[in-house]
Image: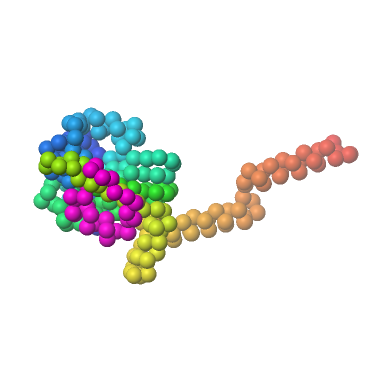
Amino acid sequence: MKGRRVSLDRPTDTDYELIADWLGPASQAAVLTADAGEYVTPEDLKRLNSTGQIRQFAVRTHDGTTVGTVNYRQQGPVGNYAIGGAIGDPELWQRGLGAEAFDLLIDHLFHARNAHRMQFTTALYNKGVLRMVTRAGFVLEGILRDHHYLDGTYHHAAIWSLLRYEYYDSLARQELRDPNYVRPDVIPESAKAQALDIMLSHLKHPRSETSIQLLLSDAEAEALTTMPGAR
């Protein structure tokens, strides 16, 4: 999954080392994403990813530098996901890298994995994420009172969500605003149409073989052999 500034890739062992540091208790990124807690090892992250409990992606710039991570996990019924992540180095915050990484993740889940609902939780002291989410079309579902403890006091958190139809409505609005906008398709519509033409041409050919045609041919042959007078 590749955007204008970053791409989402399968994490390497080196990436898991970086992600473990970014999610550690002393990490400023973990504090802002409210993921700070007990020490997590690269092996823990790799195990969670390999078992599908939490799917991690490495966020890389186009020169190959890993700058952050995004993740998703199924939460509740099939088609419902919780997402999270962070850009690790504070020097790279407020540059749009995290916003694009989340856009790529959301596109992947809605447009390639048939997601129905996306949600994430953010602490109300995280002004960067709050600024991003209030501009991105997510719907505020509720406030979790005194959900996080930081700097000697409790802080509220907010739950945000985006539904499938809301996502596709946003794509339709983007297409109206920008005639050059291309939906995040893995295979272009033109290639899909060409593939369908190949299949239709095959089915229309009188000598093409399909399971139905073979079945009919066998049935006709059997009928001929069982007709009265057939040898």
To which quarter of the image does residue 25 belong?
top left
Q: Residue at x 34, y 70 (%)?
A: 177
227 displayed left or right of 50: right
Q: Residue at x 11, y 42 (%)?
A: 151
Q: Residue at x 42, y 49 (%)?
A: 116
From the viewer's side, name the closer residue of 204 and 176.
176
Residue 83 drawn above or below residue 173: above
Query: Residue 43 magenta-drawn?
Result: no
To which quarter of the image does residue 140 belong?
bottom left
Q: Which residues are magenta?
A: 123-147
Query: Residue 136 magenta-drawn?
Result: yes
- Residue 5 shows in the view: no
Q: Residue at x 33, y 69 (%)?
A: 178
- The total of numbered circles placed on residues is 0
Q: Residue 44 in the image: x percent, y percent?
A: 24, 30
- Residue 145 shows in the view: yes
Q: Residue 129 in the image: x percent, y percent?
A: 22, 53
Residue 75 drawn above or below residue 180: above
From the viewer's side, name the closer residue of 92 and 32.
32
